[in-house]
Image (spheres, rainbow, N blue to C red):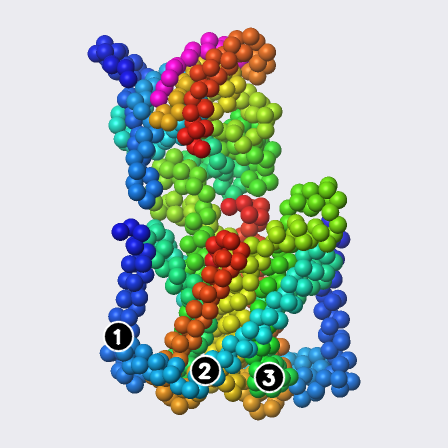
Amino acid sequence: MSRLRPFINTAAIVGVLLVLWIVLNVVLGEQTMPGPAATFERALAIVRDADFGKHLAATGAAFVVALGLSCVVGLVLGTAMGTSSVIREALEPLVFGLLAIPKVAFYPVILLLFGLGTSAKVTFGFLHGLPVLALVVAGVIKNIRPVYMRVARSINLSRSATYRRVVLPYALPEIVSGLQLAFAITLQGVIIGELFASKEGLGFLLMQAIGAADARTAIALTLLIALAVTLANALMRRFHARAAGFAPSR
Amino acid sequence: MKNRSNRARLVPTVVFAFIVGLLEVACRAGWINRQAVIAPSEMVLALVAGLQNPDVLRNLGISAMRVVAAGVVASVGGFLLGCLLRPHFGLRRALEPFFATYYAVPVVIFYPLLTLMVGYGSLPIIAIGVAMGLLAMLTATLEAFDRVPRVLPKIAAAHCLGWWATALRIRLPSAAPDLFSGLKVTIGYAVVGVIASEFLLASEGIGHLIQDDYNGFRTRDMYGAILLLVLCVLAVNRLLRLGEDHIRRNRAAGFA
Amino acid sequence: MLSVQPTTVHAARQASVNAHLSMTGVSQVFEVGATNAKVQALLDINLQLRQGEFFTVIGPSGCGKSTLLDLATGLRVPTRGRVCFEGRELSGRVPPGVGIVFQEDGSFPWLNVRDNIAFGLRRTGMRTAEVDAAVDQALATCRLHDFGAAYPAQLSGGMRQRVCLARVLVIKPRLIVLDEPFAALDAQTRLLMGDELLRIWRETGATVLLITHALDEAALLSDRIAVMSARPGRILEIIETGNPRDRDSSMAEQSRFGELTTRLWHLLRGQSQAALEQAG
């Protein structure tokens, strides 16, 4: 019984949320706040629609590219900052600045440079994921315990061998955690980017529904997006738990 | 020692100045499309012009008011909820998957829906700012109080301090640095929530102003407003950093 | 399992009336983990501390020494038995006149040394001048007079423990309880801190209850030593050391010290092995 406890608690919380939803539906009316049943029905209709797959793919593709770019550039930049104190001194404050500033401020600039479309979305996601990954990688490499480096020197490991056999294995768990964070943040960036000015994708569908004042579609889409994001992140955690052989802490 | 810290501040400034200088040259020489990006010097001029424009200042003030409101509600609310939730371990465990979900979803996507329900105005924008920051403060509060070393409440018991006295004189000061870090993150989220919402659908605010300038092809004014926003955010971050340094003064890093 | 004679019980009760701190028939059972399994931490502890003596409890890791401290000071109520301080039974509150120095660093990082020490006095309603005077005296006793304005983060581990000790001394305790106070310090500092503790003990005339796992510390510092068994913790034997009152670390060279340490280790060796197996 006690092992089922967490699931029961979670189910109870979901139940409470559903009840709240129904209450809001009754209080605010079907126009303003569509109820759960109608929303699920619309959600199913949306998913079954022929075009939905195209939009889902558009969001997904933009995300994959953005994440890939974040990873490559982030790993390179982070490694450079972690190993060379000169580079770190020069660049770290700037990367921190990028992290602190709301990326939304740059969105019009990106639109001006790339125009409406996928490139803008990808750039937006990239800007979200890059500083996170770079700083995580830089941090873990910089903070490697000196004794590990001394051990490597004491057995005359070459520089590249030290990186391959000491630094990377040591850094891997934390880099994996950073990747998870970057995954979530890049996905957020891509979807937010789609809200602003896009011709396809899940975010675009949402703004389309808003423009038509279609509350039922809007809420259905919002929940679908939330679901998609949650599933993607859950899959990511599973995958990395297996790949890295341990359970992520966040 | 002094040389090291001077150099640490000098190097990134030089690098940044170099990048800006490069951008300036690139724009003037026409390597970059002047419709897309204007030269940094022109950005600064636009910023100055904007500061003298009462309309710009009014919109900035509106955004600032929203950020403050969202920040206060999110931090106070998150703190209180965190304090209330802390002793209930079962409930905390049950809520954990929801927290993870919440972090993953960009809360801003609820904003358009919110405008359909309550209309435009400051309320839905502040609501999104609160929604983004509240959870951050809640989890920071939980972690901060979890990290109070067990020996400290024992010492309070050894001095026969009651529950309130222990909370106020021992737990709170001990958790203060971590709580302040949480506050920093919460305010950061509140800023993002407010500005992003203003970009999307708003009739006022600096985010709306930037979007409006973009739509109206007033590129110069747009850059001036963006620069103004960025500088404001950096200033707020700096203030928060100073506050954090003040709270952490006299305590070694990581000494809880 | 010994059968307890009526005369022994009466004698014990008589002794507990006169004792400064007495624990009679104290047992402690914990419910641990998700399944609430019962763990017997302490079993039938009987201790009588005389006024002004230096009493040490020594035992292997995990034998319940810290639990013993919690019960002796009133931080916890025993599952069975009674604990009396100065004739009054303890019931979940630390009585006035008892000061505790914990094993972990308990100095408050957000207060400077003076404020840390003054912490216990704030509630007494003493006037500021009186508080300052008391703090000054505690600083002097613990040899911290130059560090009043410093913060714990700026001090070494040994000095931070001295701050905790000063914070206890300032309330003028009649019983000072220390839980492995020098465990985190290096060997040399430990010896010096032991000397300091003896000096403070002589100066204040307080009863001292020291919990430790270090044999040499127990042999050197104490008037009497109670040796505990592995879990469930029982008192195996109480040894009178016969140490002179003006002792310090230089006495380590005497043969009596060596005999004492050997005797303690004979008692403890089997217990320590048992404790190791329990943990592993």
Towards the viewer: A196 or B188: A196
Would you place residue A46 above or below residue C17 in this image?
Answer: below
Residue placed under numbered mark 1 in the picture = A22
Q: Which one is in front in this view, the residue at disc 3 or the one at disc 2?
A: 2
Query: Residue C56's spot in the image, x, y percent?
Result: 43, 20
- Can you identify the residue that label 2 sits on? A53
Mark 3 to mark 1: distance in Å? 40 Å
Mark closest to the chain's N terminus, 3 or 2: 2
Few, some or many residues within 10 Å of mark 1 (<14, 14–19, 20+): some
Q: Please tell me how crowded label 2 is: few (under 14), some (14-19), or many (20+) other residues with Cα within 10 Å.
A: some
B122 magenta-colored: no
The residue labelled by disc 3 is A111
Q: Is residue A96 visible?
A: no
Which of the pair C66/C209 is nearer the observer?
C66
Pointer 3 and pointer 1: residues touching (CB < 8 Å)?
A: no
* Real-space CA distance between mark 2 and mark 1, rounded to the nearest whole angstrom: 30 Å
| Picture quadrant of residue C21 | top left
User: Image height check: is C263 above or below B42?
Assistant: above
